Structures are given as C-alpha cells and as structure tokens.
Amino acid sequence: MTLNTGNQLVVTAIGEDRPGIVSELTKLVSETNCNIIDSRIAILGNEFTFIMLLEGDISAISRVEYNIPTKSVELGLLTMMKRTSQHQEKQYKAGYKLTYHGPDTPGTLSKVTQLMADYQVNIAALKSDSVEQDGDVVMRSEIDINFSRDVDEAEFKHQLEIIFSKSNVEHILKRIR
C-alpha cells in the first residue's frame, strides 16, 4: 500500500482500560486494508483513549467506517470517526517547546492557551497533568507551539512572563526549530 492516497480517516476510541484493545482495533484496521499512519494512546483516569489516523483507498476507509461500530460494542468502547485529508504543512518562522510546572491552580492552562489564541500561535502538541509532590499537587505541562511570521515574539514572551509570575509557575520556553 502506498501513502498519500488522499483518503484518510481519524478514529478515536475511549473505554475502560484493559489489555487487548489496541490489538483488536489494529487487527480490524489491517483486515480492512487501511494503514495506520499516525496514532496516540493515553490513559486518562481509568479510561483508555486511542486516536488513529488511517489511510487507504475509498473502499477500505468505508469498510472501517462500517466495521468500527460493531467492534466498539464488542469492546465496550465509545468511538468517533471523521474523514480528513493529508495535512498541509504550514510555514512558520519559529517553533518552541513551552514547559512549565508549579502549584496546581485552576485556570493556568486556560490563560496560557488563550494567550496563544490571542497571538495566533499554533499549538502542535500539548501534554498536561497534575501530580502529588512533597504533599502538594503540582501541574506540569509541555506545549509545542509554532509562531507564524506575523507574531510579535517579544511581546508574546512578555505576556507569558506576566501570566507565570502571577501564578508562581516556573517555565522554560525553548526554541526547537
């Protein structure tokens, strides 16, 4: 099978975590002649989450769409599917990784992502969690971001400093491309 057929499907599955779910879903994908070109797995609470980007000819994509609901019922999963097309890479002037941690207070991630939205900064990846550390709950986040040519990097960084200093949060903004 060749990539870039133009026929792609995003499949998201959520359900109680247990062994064998990935095996069952990837077997179904393989049997329908689709290829998994990207995927992510995470355990959130007691729930397993699996996101796959599939590619195949139109009949293979249709077979997945037809067969996933039955397999979902068998496995006790909630699934969602959406057809898509190949991602068109945009030209950015810079890419950064923002890493921060500090007291787990409601609203920090919301303020950071709102600043990104206000400055038209693209979020490419985000991972955030809370952990207990020395008797306190601490939030940790990693966000990969891309700046378009129009973003005033200095002003964005200044506003980010303000958010983190008010929240008593330590951060590192490191250029990665």
Image (cartoon, rainbow, N blue to C red):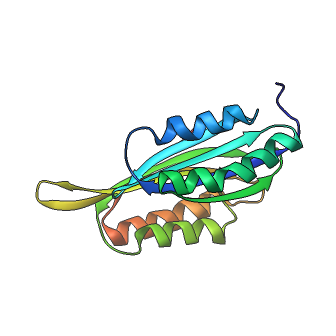
Q: In this view of the protein, which residue sits in the foreground, 76 or 84?
A: 76
Residue 16's x, y, as percent?
Answer: 39, 55
Residue at (41, 70) in percent of width and height: 108
Q: Say left or right for 18 vs 138.
A: right
Q: In this view of the protein, which residue sits in the foreground, 135 or 68?
A: 68
Location of residue 163 with respect to 88 vertically, above or below? below
Count of marks, rendered view: 0
In the picture as drawn, the residue positioned furthest to the top comes out as 1
Location of residue 115 with respect to 125 vertically, above or below? below
Residue 134's x, y, as percent?
Answer: 12, 54
Residue at (33, 55) in percent of width and height: 101
Location of residue 133 with respect to 29 vertically, above or below? below
Q: Say left or right for 29 vs 51.
A: right
Residue 131's x, y, as percent?
Answer: 25, 55
Q: Say left or right for 27 vs 20.
A: right
Tell me, yes or no, if residue 172 can be seen here. Answer: no
Corner quadrant of residue 167: bottom left
- Quarter of the image with the C terminus is top right
Residue at (38, 49) in percent of width and height: 17
Tell me, yes or no, if residue 120 can be seen here. Answer: yes
Residue 117's x, y, as percent?
Answer: 64, 69
- Quarter of the image with the N terminus is top right
Corner quadrant of residue 7: top right
Q: In this view of the protein, which residue sits in the foreground, 61 or 125?
A: 61
